[in-house]
């Protein structure tokens, strides 16, 4: 490493013997992160002597005020904790899964330092790279790009098509240490496969290892705005079927990224604190697949010209959704929903296994002062300064606005759709549809209601259920309709990671006016019972009995049902219990013993799959505290 001003050393007699000495090194807060060599040069009347003592690793220090990552709260949670929760599902049914960050596991520190050494920035100019490592903004961009392998020797390869035979399915990972050590031990070949929460958790691990306070954050209904117009378009048929996307813009039911805490002297006051850093490869920033650090405060203020990539992050939490009703290429209805995107933003609460709502930190109420101007920089993905402005139309909040194909606003016919409650897998889906005739005349309406399955980041499949009806409404009448989708209509199709999309389209048979409402939700997975002898606090190097059981809650048998158990730090190999046909209300059971070799938080993961495709219908993460 090159020398940096501000270093000091103090030598004093050693305590062990007269021939020993104690040397204290003091590094400046601006020193670069990395591995340093330590040598001692002694000059005496007898001559000069030079000793290579070894090396030491210098990290960011969030405990001292002079460091740009200084934080005066929750360092136990955001730096030292090697355990966290990732939130998934939908905003109507938030589920969590634990993640072992593993920053203290063997070889993890070495793997994190290797990321810096094999980065394109280091290979291009190692001297400049070493000097810039004192800046957490620079560090976060280097590490963010290195977590994915799209344009470098990065850690993870992404895959979203459901075919993972050449690697590990993203849903199978539960910790960062295995991923990072596999990558380092393979001579830096990418580990297969990751999706957004895997990318984010690995990034969070690396940043905590480097001493930067970090946390994993989930955005529910996150927009991917590729063209930068802050509008995401969705298309539906006249019967309410959600169609394939007409552009590469999309909305993911959830998306996971990382917030890192740091100062932003490059931006001036008001932009320090939490910064969004997103390692999932989506768009290029300055030529690389990296996103951030984007100040959360800038996102909330719609200061989208602020580097880096604030416009992209702003769109992810606050873009408009335009829903079209199409007949072929003909647009029959257009509906603008200003509240659909960024419905919930959350992270793990410090010191508790509960979500903390961060939505207010990203989204302010749109009022006249804010809607009058919002900076929009077309070059922001490259981190350039603002060059143009965009005034987003925020005329109202709440539900969608109905606009006809000609562009004139229509308020004479309304429809809304809601769940009576979030159902569990095996229960009926109960829907409530409210139709309003706001005109002064009688109307004859035709309604189409259908349900489709989809993955959190993909288009919907063909409908698995539909309902059609005619509905006469008197002037000013409001009708509330209750419909139910039986579990037998969906349970043979659904896995615990699937999303249900339900859409209703109502048409006036006389005027041809149409209105639309839609909702997406996940079903609550069936419970897997995990009982540990003596409770969830166990002693190190002591055997404890565990009983695991799953009861089929469905109305149909499960063919080729498999109960799989994994014990991270509790037992070595996976355990399997199989049933050729698991009848309704019949149980799969497994008794085993666990023994932890070292203290800490350990995970026992139980999974139930079925069928030739091994579709997962239940997964339970059980935390065991070893003392």
Image (tube, rainbow, N blue to C red):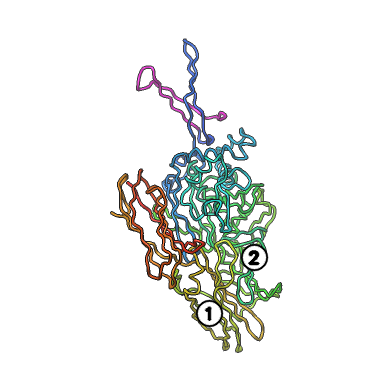
Tell me: 129 left or right of 530: right
Q: Could you say where residue 337 lies in the image, as x and y percent from the top left?
A: 59, 69
Local SS, label 2: loop
Local SS, label 1: strand
Q: Which residues are magenta?
A: 1-27
**Residue drawn at x 47%, y 61% as measured from the top left:** 616
Q: Which mark is residue 245?
A: 2
Residue furthest left as drawn: 534
Q: State yes or no: residue 29 in magenta.
A: no
Q: Are marks 1 and 2 in contact (CB under 8 Å)?
A: no
Tell me: 150 left or right of 8: right
Quadrant where the N terminus sits is top right
Q: Could you say where residue 261 lies in the image, as x and y percent from the top left?
A: 51, 47
Q: Earlier in the sequence, mark 1 or mark 2?
A: 2
Residue 258 showing in the rendered view? no
Q: Could you say where residue 41 lies in the image, as x and y percent from the top left?
A: 49, 19
**Residue drawn at x 61%, y 66% as measured from the top left:** 321
Query: Which is more foreground, mark 1 or mark 2?
Result: 2
Depth check, front residue: 134 or 609: 609
**Residue drawn at x 53%, y 53% as measured from the top left:** 257
How far is disc 1 from disc 2 in space, using C-alphas? Answer: 27 Å
In the image, residue 277 above or below residue 519:
above
Q: Could you say where residue 430 lies in the image, as x and y percent from the top left?
A: 47, 76
Tell me: 617 left or right of 374: left
Depth check, front residue: 303 or 524: 524
Depth check, front residue: 34 or 89: 89
Q: State yes or no: residue 21 in magenta.
A: yes
Residue bearing the label numbered 1: 434
Depth check, front residue: 598 or 552: 552
Residue 597 showing in the rendered view? yes
Q: Residues within 10 Å of mark 1 (few under 14, many from 20)?
A: some
- Quadrant of the rendered image containing residue 96: bottom left
């Amino acid at each position: 490493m090159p020398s940096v001003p501000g270093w000091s050393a103090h030598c004093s007699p050693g305590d062990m013997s007269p021939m020993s000495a104690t040397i204290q090194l003091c590094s400046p807060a601006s020193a670069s992160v990395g591995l340093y060599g330590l040598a001692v040069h002694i000059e005496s009347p007898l001559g000069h002597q030079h000793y290579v003592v070894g090396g030491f690793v210098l990290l960011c220090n969030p405990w001292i005020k002079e460091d740009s990552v200084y934080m005066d709260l929750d360092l136990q949670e955001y730096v030292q904790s090697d355990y966290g929760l990732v939130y998934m599902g939908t905003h109507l049914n938030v589920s969590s899964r634990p993640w072992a960050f593993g920053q203290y596991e063997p070889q993890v520190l070495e793997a994190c330092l290797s990321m810096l050494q094999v980065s394109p920035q280091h290979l291009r100019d190692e001297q400049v790279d070493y000097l810039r490592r004192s800046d957490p903004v620079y560090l976060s961009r280097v590490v963010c790009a290195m977590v994915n392998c799209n344009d470098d020797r990065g850690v993870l390869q992404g895959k979203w098509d459901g075919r993972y035979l050449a690697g590990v399915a993203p849903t199978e990972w539960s910790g960062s240490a295995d991923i990072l050590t596999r990558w380092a031990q393979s001579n830096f070949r990418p580990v297969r496969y990751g999706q957004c929460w895997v990318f984010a958790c690995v990034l969070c691990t690396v940043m905590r290892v480097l001493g930067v306070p970090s946390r994993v954050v989930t955005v529910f209904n996150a927009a991917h705005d590729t063209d930068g117009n802050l509008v995401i378009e969705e298309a539906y048929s006249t019967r309410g079927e959600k169609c394939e996307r007409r552009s590469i813009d999309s909305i993911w039911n959830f998306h996971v990224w990382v917030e890192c805490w740091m100062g932003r002297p490059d931006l001036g006051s008001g932009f320090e604190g939490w910064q969004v850093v997103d390692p999932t490869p989506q768009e290029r920033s300055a030529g690389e697949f990296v996103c951030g650090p984007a100040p959360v405060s800038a996102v909330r203020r719609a200061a989208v010209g602020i580097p880096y990539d604030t416009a992209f992050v702003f769109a992810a939490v606050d873009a408009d959704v335009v829903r079209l009703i199409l007949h072929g290429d003909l647009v029959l209805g257009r509906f603008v929903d200003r509240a659909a995107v960024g419905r919930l933003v959350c992270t793990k609460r410090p010191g508790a296994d509960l979500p903390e709502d961060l939505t207010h930190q990203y989204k302010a109420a749109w009022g006249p002062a804010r809607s009058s101007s919002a900076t929009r920089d077309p070059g922001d993905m490259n981190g350039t300064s603002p060059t143009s402005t965009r005034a987003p139309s925020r005329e109202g909040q709440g539900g969608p606005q109905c606009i006809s194909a000609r562009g004139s606003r229509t308020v004479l016919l309304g429809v809304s759709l809601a769940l009576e409650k979030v159902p569990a897998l095996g229960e009926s889906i109960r829907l409530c549809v409210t139709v309003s005739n706001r005109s002064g005349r009688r109307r004859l309406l035709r309604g189409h209601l259908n349900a489709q399955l989809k993955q959190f980041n993909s288009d919907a499949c063909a409908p698995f259920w539909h309902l059609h009806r005619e509905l006469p409404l008197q002037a000013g009448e409001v009708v509330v309709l209750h419909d139910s989708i039986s579990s037998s209509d969906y349970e043979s199709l659904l896995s615990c990671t699937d999303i249900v999309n339900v859409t209703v389209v109502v048409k006036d048979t006389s005027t041809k006016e149409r209105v639309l409402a839609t909702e997406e939700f996940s079903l609550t997975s069936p419970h897997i019972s995990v009982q540990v002898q003596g409770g969830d606090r166990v002693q190190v190097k002591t055997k404890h009995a565990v009983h695991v059981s799953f009861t089929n809650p469905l109305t149909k048998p499960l063919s080729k049902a498999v109960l799989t158990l994994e014990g991270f730090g509790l037992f070595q190999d996976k355990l399997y219990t199989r049933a050729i046909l698991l009848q309704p209300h019949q149980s799969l059971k497994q008794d085993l013993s666990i023994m932890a070799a070292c203290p800490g938080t350990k995970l026992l993961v139980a999974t139930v799959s079925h069928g030739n495709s091994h579709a997962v219908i239940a997964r339970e993460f059980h935390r065991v505290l070893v003392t």
